[in-house]
Amino acid sequence: MGSAAFLRNCWYVAAWEHEVGPAQLFQRTILGQSLLLFRTSSGNVVALDNKCCHRHAPLSLGRREGDCVRCMYHGLKFGPDGKCVEIPGQTAIPSTVRVKTFPVAERKRWIWVWLGDPAKADPDAIPDMFSLEHPQWRMKPGYMHYKANHLLISDNILDFSHLSYVHEKTLGGSTAIADTRPKTERLERGVRLTREIRNAAPAPNHVKLGAPEGPVDRWWIYDYVLPGLLLLDSGVKASNPENRSGHTLHFHSCQAITPETERTTHYFFMQAHGFSLEDSSITDSLYNGVVAAFDEDQRIVEAQQQLIDSTPASEMMGLIADTALAHFRNLYQRALQQEQTESS
């Protein structure tokens, strides 16, 4: 899958808000495009092509001068609109001396960028990732860098049966997860999954957070939509209502899969808790537990990618559990074909 196979008329998460400081030049590659992100004096985030149009030196190695960036190779200075405003030793500045700009939107602690047709960049199309910034939820921001294709990570998210095995000692705790088929609903731009299990062993991570040690009921209800965005409601409670040894734990997670290249991916995530909001140790424990579990995901998915790349090409064998991921992949390919048809 080459760079031409990326959806471009979509909003992608480019960074957490704290990654782009007030005086910083921040570089990140998305869909194979090296971007320079920085904030103007008003606090707005700008996204420029990181490649100086003169000799293609990276502007991220340049210097901030007010709301402008000076390339520190030959000194060209560019404004936040991408236009060159100064060329050392040259008075006339042709209008063609400029770098490309990209639409940016900042919503609830995530910085989003649009790499497709700017005329189609509607910020209202960004899903409401409400728990990123909400008084009834508390969380810590997370980021991982995968050496794997973005669709392999989407596959992982769309089939939670892997919790029973990949996360046996962290987020899993029961083979009942894999044994229970989820309800799958098709959405216009994605899929909704509902999986519930009853009278099962609790996840080790949840016991640490105060979940009952006896049989529990658990649920996962989530939407996964193009280009790779997850909104997950999940929780655990005692199966026996007479069991007062633990209380209901309610979580909400926002995750974003942003392709860097054909074989590398940015993974933005958080897991918020809707209980014990005044206890920062719960936030820290939840974050550490999720990171440990996501490290397990990363190990298996990167090993999968390495094996795919190092062995003869072959088709993956489909199972009933693949219903959601197969639908999402088909939806992705249809959207991609439509986008390519419209641009040809």
Image: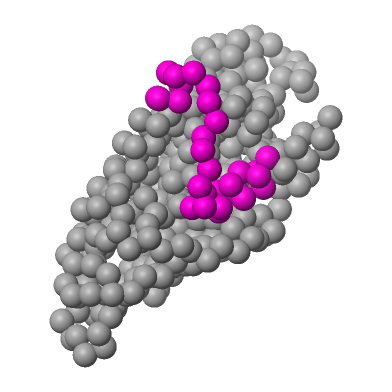
- Residue at (40% x, 73% y) in the render: 135
Q: Quadrant of the C terminus?
A: top right
Say left or right for 52 vs 244.
right
Q: Position of residue 201 (x, y in %)?
A: 23, 67
Residue 326's place in the image compared with 65, above or below, is below
Say left or right for 337 vs 55.
right
182 or 269, which is in the foreground?
Answer: 182
Residue 90's place in the image compared with 292, above or below, is above
* Residue at the outermost bottom position: 242
Does the stretch in magenta take in 24?
A: no
- Colouring mode (rainbow / by chain / secondary structure / one colour): one colour
Residue 185 shows in the view: yes
Q: Position of residue 285 (x, y in %)?
A: 21, 59
- Residue at (21% x, 90% y) in the render: 242
Say left or right for 240 vs 101.
left
Does the stretch in magenta take in 307?
A: yes
Residue 90's place in the image compared with 130, above or below, is above
Q: Position of residue 28 (x, y in %)?
A: 48, 32
Query: In which image quadrant can residue 189 be found?
Result: bottom right
138 or 77, which is in the foreground?
Answer: 138
Q: Position of residue 115 (x, y in %)?
A: 65, 37
Residue 20 shows in the view: no
Question: Magenta: predominant secondary structure element?
Answer: helix
Magenta residues span 306-333
- Residue at (45% x, 57% y) in the render: 254
124 or 325, which is in the foreground?
Answer: 325
Q: What count of labels does the image hold?
A: 0
Say left or right for 194 vs 304.
right
Q: Quadrant of the N terminus?
A: top right
- Residue at (66% x, 44% y) in the render: 330
